Amino acid sequence: YNAPTDVRENGCTFYVDLLEGQKTGWFYDQRDNRAMLTNFVNGKRVLDLYSYVGGFGIQSAVYGASKVVCVDSSELAVELGRQSANANSVGSRVTFVQRDVIAFLDETA
């Protein structure tokens, strides 16, 4: 197996590692929730916490969010998320932060 694997969902491409990534490599059960969110993000700023590879955040950017910040503690997830954002041509509007979410919120609140 040569990671990463690409997953296509709701018109977006994501890179995931099926062996080293979290759980199954992709949170398939959230597909409908991610699709529903796309109706509300046009022109908005989005904060995607515990983002993994940015499933909610990247789809938000693809569907018109003006700025997205994705936060996850996993170095691998953040790197794959950056690659995924670039693959979807939204890398300039999506920022990934490798940080514990609680610490991130304490520092930015």
Image (cartoon, grey):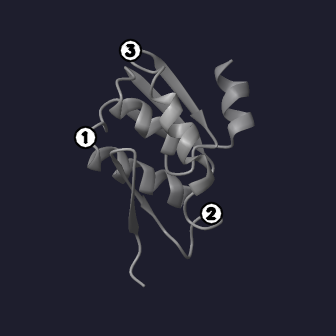
Residue at the spot 42% in from the left edge and 39% down from the top edge: 58
* Tag 3–tag 1 contact (CB < 8 Å): no
Residue at the spot 39% in from the left edge and 18% down from the top edge: 42
Query: Could you tell me which quadrant the C terminus lies in?
Result: top right
Outermost left residue: 89
Q: CA distance from mark 1 to mark 2?
A: 24 Å
Q: Secondary structure at mark 3?
A: loop
Residue at the spot 42% in from the left edge and 85% down from the top edge: 1
* Tag 3–tag 2 contact (CB < 8 Å): no
Q: To which residue does mark 3 refer? A: 43
Q: To which residue does mark 1 refer? A: 89
Q: Amino acid at mark 1?
A: Ser
Outermost top residue: 43
Q: Name the quadrant containing residue 95.
A: top left
Q: Amino acid at mark 3?
A: Gly
Give residue 71's position: percent from left, percent from top: 57, 39
Give residue 47's position: percent from left, percent from top: 55, 28
Residue at the spot 27% in from the left edge and 50% down from the top edge: 87
Q: To which residue does mark 2 refer? A: 22
Badge 2 local density, few (<14 within 10 Å), some, or many (20+)?
Answer: some
User: Above or below — where is 6 with respect to 18?
Assistant: above
Closer to the N terminus: mark 3 or mark 2? 2
Q: CA distance from mark 3 to mark 2?
A: 30 Å
Badge 1 local density, few (<14 within 10 Å), some, or many (20+)?
Answer: some
Q: Is residue 98 at least partly visible in the picture?
A: no
Badge 3 local density, few (<14 within 10 Å), some, or many (20+)?
Answer: few
User: Above or below — where is 48 with respect to 44?
Assistant: below
Q: CA distance from mark 3 to mark 1?
A: 17 Å
Closer to the N terminus: mark 3 or mark 1? 3
